[in-house]
Image: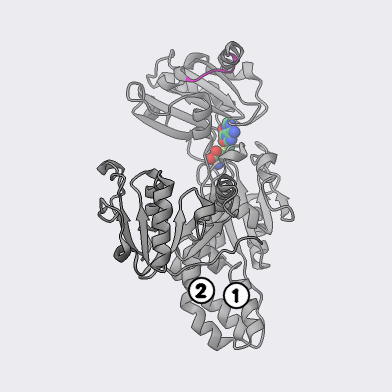
């Protein structure tokens, strides 16, 4: 270790920033949400009002003198005149402060690590001033796996610290409790902002830990949207849940590339269904999720797209809650959004579509079919899920209800995946278009004026060839 990272309490600490350019503003922004007493000098000229952060202190348009520097903990100097910056640094040291000349590690008493600021939880990456860009790159990777709400977990731990100490006096037993607690549903709930539930769960854990007889730990279920297939379309929350999972129960629509991002030693259970072939009945899937959670596992129920868009996520959530198990739902990019984005088809458009409807072409057996007559209005985009097998019927219902047969349509198969295909045509030719595509992957039908704006696969090939 060539450098040491220490944390400096900022309550009441005087922090001085010298400079009016962007590097000085970057330092100012670091401290704006902190309890530090921030003082700002702009001998090189203050930035324009629009560039100045609203919460910034009023700048002093002069050099700081010895009295200004007295009592400061840290002085940041961001001036292009390095000789002047070094003189200010010297004066800061004489006043008892530590000085940092921005981008001049050799002349600084400390370097600024790349920081992730989550309130009480702060993560720093330092490279001894040698490779700040590497530090920033590492920071963004850590940021991707650090829950936004991690500070709430720390806050909850802070609240219960005394109670835990009283209930578990033995140091090692207490350490084991905290290790377990930070991997428990209580921590997940706190990170999700559900503080009351998190507190209840943490107290329950504490009661269990301090009771003479151990009771089995309960797991948690994350119902996670895997997106349409492209792993880059996973949300950060989904990625974190996948990397923390003990068991992943997944569907046919979840791509191998998405599963590759999951924790290597997580157990994977495939409960995929193909159309008409319900390989694992829904009630058995729900039972499986509940059993795995009751065995104390962190269960990820991973579903293609978004769990609440034609995904039966709602039923699974009800079942898990009815079993008294904590559940967190993580949304995903639904197929209509992904297919629209990757083909350049705007779902709404000021000139062509004032509304968009996500509709299923395949109601549950014996269930209510979509009211196509109500969906036949012009200037309206329909994104039809599970509609390829019913294309002829959907088109004739819409035309019978008054939709023009010449209305543009687009069919997108395997949206967002490397083998994506898009074909365009007219509503009165939709069934033939679908037949011509000889679909083997999931496909979405778009019906409406905006479908004319989609880039079809053959057009894409032409554009790519010309580039
Ligand atoms: C049971 S629904 C699941 C929808 C999923 N929950 C979502 O939000 O995207 C399955 C249908 O979604 C559509 N779909 C899912 N992924 C797709 C993709 N990558 N490309 C095109 N359509 C897709 C197809 O219409 C498929 O028949």
Q: Quadrant of the C terminus?
A: top right
**Relative height, residue 318 to residue 384 (above, below):** below
Task: Residue under label 1, please give it.
Answer: 178
C-beta proximity under 8 Å, tags 2 and 1:
yes
Task: Residue under label 2, please give it.
Answer: 157
In the image shown, does 162 or 66 lie closer to the viewer? Answer: 66
Residue numbers of the magenta segment? 454-458
| Residue at 50% over, 83% down | 162
Answer with left or right where residue 404 lies relative to residue 325: left
Q: Is residue 58 magenta?
A: no
Mark 2 crowdedness (10 Å alpha carbons): few <14, some 14-19, many ≥20: some
* Picture quarter with ligand 1: top right
Q: CA distance from mark 2 to mark 1?
A: 8 Å
Where does the image place residue 199, in percent across and percent down from the top left? 48, 73
Overall secondary structure of the magenta section: loop
Is residue 248 visible in this depiction of the protein?
A: yes
- Dividing the picture into quadrants, the one containing residue 194 is bottom left
For residue 363, the mark is: none
């Amino acid at each position: 270790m060539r450098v040491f990272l220490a944390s400096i309490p900022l309550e009441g600490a005087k922090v001085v920033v010298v400079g009016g350019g962007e590097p000085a503003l970057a330092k100012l922004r670091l401290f704006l949400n902190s309890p530090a007493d921030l003082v700002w000098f702009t001998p090189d000229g203050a930035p324009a009002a629009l560039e100045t952060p609203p919460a910034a202190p009023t700048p002093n348009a002069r050099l700081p003198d010895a009295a200004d520097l007295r009592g400061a903990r840290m002085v940041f100097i961001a001036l292009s005149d390095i000789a002047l910056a070094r003189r200010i640094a010297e004066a800061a040291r004489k006043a008892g402060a530590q000085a940092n000349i921005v981008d001049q590690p050799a002349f600084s008493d400390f370097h600024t690590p790349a920081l992730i600021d989550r309130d009480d939880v702060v993560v720093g990456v330092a490279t001894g001033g040698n490779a700040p860009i590497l530090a920033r790159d590492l920071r963004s990777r850590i940021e991707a796996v650090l829950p936004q709400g991690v500070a709430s977990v720390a806050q909850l731990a802070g609240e219960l610290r005394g109670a835990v100490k009283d209930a578990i006096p033995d140091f090692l037993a207490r350490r084991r409790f905290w290790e377990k607690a930070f991997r428990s549903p209580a921590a997940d709930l706190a990170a999700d902002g559900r503080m009351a539930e998190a507190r209840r769960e943490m107290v329950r854990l504490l009661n269990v830990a301090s009771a003479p007889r151990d009771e089995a730990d309960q797991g948690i279920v994350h119902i996670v949207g895997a997106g349409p297939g492209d792993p880059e379309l996973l949300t950060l929350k989904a990625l974190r849940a996948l990397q923390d999972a003990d068991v992943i129960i997944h569907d046919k629509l979840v791509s191998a590339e998405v599963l590759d991002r999951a924790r290597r030693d997580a157990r994977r259970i495939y409960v995929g269904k193909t159309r008409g072939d319900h390989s694992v009945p829904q009630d058995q899937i729900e039972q499986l999720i509940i059993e795995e959670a009751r065995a104390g596992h962190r269960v990820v129920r991973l579903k293609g797209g978004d769990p609440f868009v034609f995904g039966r996520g709602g039923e699974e959530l009800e079942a898990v809650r009815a079993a008294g198990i904590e559940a967190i739902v993580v949304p995903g990019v639904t197929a209509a959004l992904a297919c629209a984005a990757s083909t350049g088809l705007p779902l709404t458009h000021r000139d062509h579509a004032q509304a968009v409807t996500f509709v299923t072409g395949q109601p549950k057996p014996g269930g209510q079919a979509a009211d196509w007559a109500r969906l036949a209005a012009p200037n309206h985009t329909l994104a039809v899920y599970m509609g390829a097998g019913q294309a002829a019927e959907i088109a004739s219902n819409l035309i019978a209800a008054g939709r023009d047969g010449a209305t543009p349509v687009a069919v997108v198969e395997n949206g967002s995946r490397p083998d994506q295909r898009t074909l365009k045509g007219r509503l009165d030719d939709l069934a033939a278009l679908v037949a011509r595509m000889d679909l083997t992957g999931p496909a979405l039908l778009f019906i409406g004026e905006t479908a004319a704006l989609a880039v079809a696969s053959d057009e894409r090939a032409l554009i790519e060839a010309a580039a």
